[in-house]
Image (cartoon, rainbow, N blue to C red):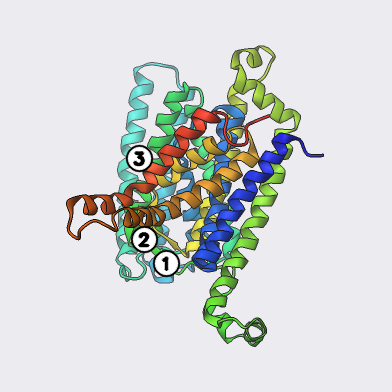
């Protein structure tokens, strides 16, 4: 027999499912599946943030940067290499990056192995300044050569030409690597400094994506990223698909789009199910109990012999990898990388709203919040416009009040997010599905 709280959880998920099903009947199944697929990806992002905040109390406001690294992985892994660009300056770019890394490592070794004093400081300055000029002399020439190769369509090195599904775990690894570098320096700071550090580094990552054309074409964007599912045009020419459409009595153009979205949904559901199983196992394991103990009282946990900073770094890296995985999945779904779309409102604030509304510290709550908030984010603007049109139906055309009310529909998203957040914090401060 289900407990009252479990019954409430089932009803909440049933309500969210009814929203998507209703969208299919009222609008179209193409629209419903489009929102559903992005809801799956948003749920995965929320899982990652929930691990950082709900498990360990880490305030990461740089989610956007880790998601963008996942998107970059989709380009670097799946796009075909641009042979002419590699021949023009690819090797010089690699040598320049290697020289830059050697410079940084050399400076670190000097700092750690030489005794403190003026000699160490001068040696570090010589290595850093000299290495910088050598790095730029080699690197800049390679970049200029690569970006001059057909900049209208390429102008970058391309990728490895591997299956795009390989990019998903690689996106997680890229985000995990960045999180390790951030965590080694920032996790020893107070939570507010961690927030500032993660936000700043996320902005640096986005700035690099926008300005380094040789890497992923910058603001010129990378389009035509390979897909792990069939193309609609190929389906419309496949005999088995045409036979299926005939038996169902459907329009083959519309059904081909729905079929592709269902294929994406199957892949995303598989990933989400695996992640839910893994994070639930971790949450209910001794490791999860240890993380909760550290979150609730770091001083007591440290007194019991727990390495608080190492455990924080561990969960920070794992959760960032999940966000990177979601970023690679999203770029695959869109078939394009658009650095300008990575904004804090969508990829940090909204994900945090999902976690807070769903229930911090509860993985199923994060999933529920991901679906609910994403549906609201997409649908409240057209619903708000319909509401304002109904309210102003009796007003004269050209009325300043009518124009003002109709224009205000564009802000319904932000208004609704703030209203939902306030209502949840007032009446269910631990979220819709709180931590047990």
Q: Position of residue 48 (x, y in %)?
A: 57, 41
Q: Nearer the viewer, residue 266 or 381?
A: 381
Residue placed most toward the observer, 426 or 300: 426
Q: Which residue is mark 1?
A: 223
Element on which disc 3 rests = helix
Q: Which mark is residue 363?
A: none
Element carrying mark 2 = loop
Name which residue lies at 65% across and 26% down.
291
Picture quadrant where residue 284 is located: top right
Residue 338 image-quadrant placement:
bottom left
How far separated are the C-alphas under marks 2 and 3? 27 Å
The disc, 1 or 3, on the residue closer to the chain's N-terminal end is 3
5 lies left or right of 79:
right
Q: Secondary structure at mark 1?
A: strand
Residue occupied by mark 3: 131
Residue at position x 29%, y 58% from top?
393
Residue drawn at point x = 54 percent, y = 47 percent: 372
Query: Which mark is first along the chain, 2 or 1?
Result: 2
Between 285 and 167, the one nearer to me in the picture? 285
Say which residue label 2 marks: 217
């Amino acid at each position: 027999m289900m407990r009252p709280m479990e019954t409430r959880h089932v009803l909440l998920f049933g309500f969210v499912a009814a929203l998507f099903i209703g969208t299919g009947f009222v609008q179209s199944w193409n629209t419903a599946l489009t929102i559903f697929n992005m809801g799956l990806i948003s749920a995965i992002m929320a899982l990652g943030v929930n691990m950082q905040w709900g498990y360990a109390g880490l305030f990461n406001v740089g989610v956007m940067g880790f998601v963008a690294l996942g998107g970059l992985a989709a380009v670097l892994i799946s796009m075909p290499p641009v042979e002419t660009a590699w021949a023009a300056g690819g090797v010089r770019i690699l040598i320049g990056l290697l020289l830059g890394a050697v410079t940084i490592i050399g400076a670190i070794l000097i700092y750690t192995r030489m005794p403190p004093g003026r000699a160490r400081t001068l040696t570090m300055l010589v290595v850093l300044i000299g290495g910088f000029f050598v790095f730029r002399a080699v690197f800049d020439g390679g970049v200029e050569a690569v970006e001059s190769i057909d900049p209208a369509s390429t102008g970058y090195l391309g990728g490895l030409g591997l299956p795009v599904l390989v990019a998903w775990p690689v996106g997680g690894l890229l985000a995990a690597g960045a999180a390790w570098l951030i965590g080694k320096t920032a996790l020893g700071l107070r939570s507010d400094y961690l927030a500032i550090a993660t936000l700043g580094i996320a902005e640096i990552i986005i700035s690099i994506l926008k300005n380094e054309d040789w890497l992923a074409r910058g603001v010129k964007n990378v389009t035509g990223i390979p897909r792990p599912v069939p193309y609609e045009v190929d389906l419309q020419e496949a005999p088995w698909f045409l036979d299926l459409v005939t038996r169902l009595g459907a329009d083959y153009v519309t059904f081909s789009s729905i079929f592709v979205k269902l294929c994406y949904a199957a892949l995303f559901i598989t990933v989400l199910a695996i992640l839910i199983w893994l994070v639930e196992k971790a949450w209910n394991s001794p490791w999860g109990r240890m993380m909760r103990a550290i979150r609730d009282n770091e001083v007591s946990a440290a007194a019991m012999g727990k390495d608080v900073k190492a455990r924080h770094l561990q969960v920070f890296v794992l959760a960032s990898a999940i966000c990177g995985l979601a970023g690679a999945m999203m770029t695959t779904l869109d078939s394009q990388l658009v650095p300008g779309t990575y904004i804090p409102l969508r990829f940090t604030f909204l994900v945090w709203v999902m976690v807070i509304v769903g229930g911090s510290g509860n993985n199923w709550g994060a999933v529920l919040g991901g679906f609910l908030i994403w549906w609201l984010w997409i649908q409240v603007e057209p619903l708000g416009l319909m509401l304002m049109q109904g309210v102003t139906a009796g007003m004269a055309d050209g009325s300043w009040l009518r124009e003002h009310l109709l224009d205000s529909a564009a802000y319904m998203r932000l208004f609704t997010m703030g209203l939902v957040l306030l209502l949840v914090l007032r009446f269910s401060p631990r979220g819709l599905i709180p931590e047990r």
